[in-house]
Amino acid sequence: MSLKMRILALIGLFLLLMTVAGGAVMVANARDAVRAEMASALELGRALGLAVTERGTLAGGSGMLNGLGLRHLRFVEGDDVAAPGVESDRAPDWFTALIAVEPQELRLAGTLRVVAEPGDEIAEVWEDMSDLAAAVLAVGVLLLAAAFLAVGRALAPLSRLEAGVKRLRDGDYRFAFDSGGVPELRRLGTGIAALADGLAAAEQENRRVGQRIVAAQDSERREIARDIHDELGAALFAIKVDAGRLLRLAEGRADGEEAAERARKILGTAAEVHQLSRRILVRLRPALLDQLPLSEALTELVGDWMRRKPDVAWTLSFDPPAAAADLDGCEEVLRVTLYRLVQESLVNALRHAVPSAVAVSLRIDPDRVEVAVADDGPGLPAGDDPNRAGFGISGMTERVQALGGCLTIGLAEGGGTRVSARLPRPSHNSATVRLERTA
């Protein structure tokens, strides 16, 4: 049951209890009033009866006394049964039993009896209480209607408060609340607004920390790639030179077959290690980003796959096309993340599906970048959870979340799989502040 209905139910219960208590008091008072009226009527009947009997006009005296039209009184001669009052049946039997006042009788000298009947008085009490009950019912209905409107108006800010909290849960920390003039709700709204400001500040700080972590990871990978290229590459080149020299020396001698074979193995091993180091370098740091802008690096990446898989229809689009230059000017951590997203998504599309078409699209807005890679393969298996993916998807998710974005993997239009990510673009002012702080 809603809070509004609970308040109205409490008000209705309170009115019902008040009505029952008031009715009980009125019944008790009516019982005493009827008894007092009966006693007064008996005194009056006694006086009239004595006056008649003292004059000696008892014969036909009861008819004469009854002809006076006295309320509640009946005069009976001898053992005759008193006729009931004309209006004694206006009150229901249960109400008459509730009043519980029986007819009272007084015997005078001789055969004259005075009977006081409460029926007429009980009927009057019933009519008064019926009118009062109707008035109380009307007032109660009006009061409940007024309470319904008043409570609804007083609780209206709660619905706005609920909507504001839902926006907070969805990540929108712009909390504005109109308490409708209720002090308690105003204090509650002020507290939630302060909490929203704190959450917004914490999210911004987490985003800055995540960007610094990703930037630090990229910087460390760059250093590792440089070390591999400079030191391991030089060592492998020296091995190849020495092995080549051994091979040339051994080929001119009759007993140099074994040395020549070993030299060939050294050359083969050096070539394999060289290829391995190149793959590690590509994984650690995309060399294209050091040589080309992001838009051209993505074009080269898609073009490389186009040359490898000519049977697949490849598409790369920028929306709007003129905004590609803005994308090239983004921060390095954002450019690396976008490149890695497209690179990993293309690998997954070709590894886990047999698509005939793959489309890469980027939408560049002033405050965010959206990237999507869609294929027309068989799509995700039924019941498969994209979150339970390999290290590639996990790495992409961590990078995107560290930058304050969101990654979605689902079905593409017309079938297939679609990997999309939305990443915020840090403003120029925020980037300047970070540079000044780190300087």
Image: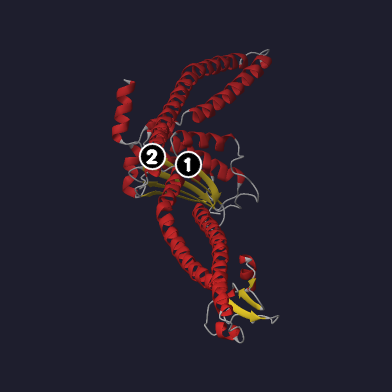
Three-letter code for the amino acid on which mark 1 is drawn: Cys
Give the foreground label among 2 and 1: 2
Quarter of the image for residue 248 reads top right
Q: Identify the element where label 1 is drawn.
A: strand
Q: Which residue is mark 2?
A: 187
Q: Residue at x 61, y 66 (%)?
A: 99
* Residue 286 can be seen in this image: yes
Where is residue 353 drawn, in percent x and y? 60, 48
- Say whether marks 2 and 1 touch (CB < 8 Å): no
Chain-order first, disc 2 or disc 1 = 2
User: Residue 439 location in percent, x, y?
Assistant: 31, 20
Residue 376: percent from left, percent from top: 55, 53
- Foreground residue, 421 or 183? 183
Q: Circle 1: is it few (<14), some (14-19), or many (20+) Cα within 10 Å?
A: some
Q: Residue 195 is drawn in which quadrant?
A: top left
Above or below: residue 78 compared with residue 164: below
Residue depicted at x 34% and y 44%: 324
Q: x%, y% of residue 88? A: 59, 78
Res 406 label: 1
Quadrant where the N terminus sits is bottom right
Q: Amino acid at mark 2?
A: Arg
Query: Helix, strand or loop at disc 2?
Result: helix
| Mark 2 Cα shell of 10 Å, populated few (<14), some (14-19), many (≥20) | few
- Real-space CA distance between mark 2 and mark 1, rounded to the nearest whole angstrom: 34 Å
Q: Which picture quadrant has residue 332?
A: top left
Disc sitting over residue 166 in the figure: none
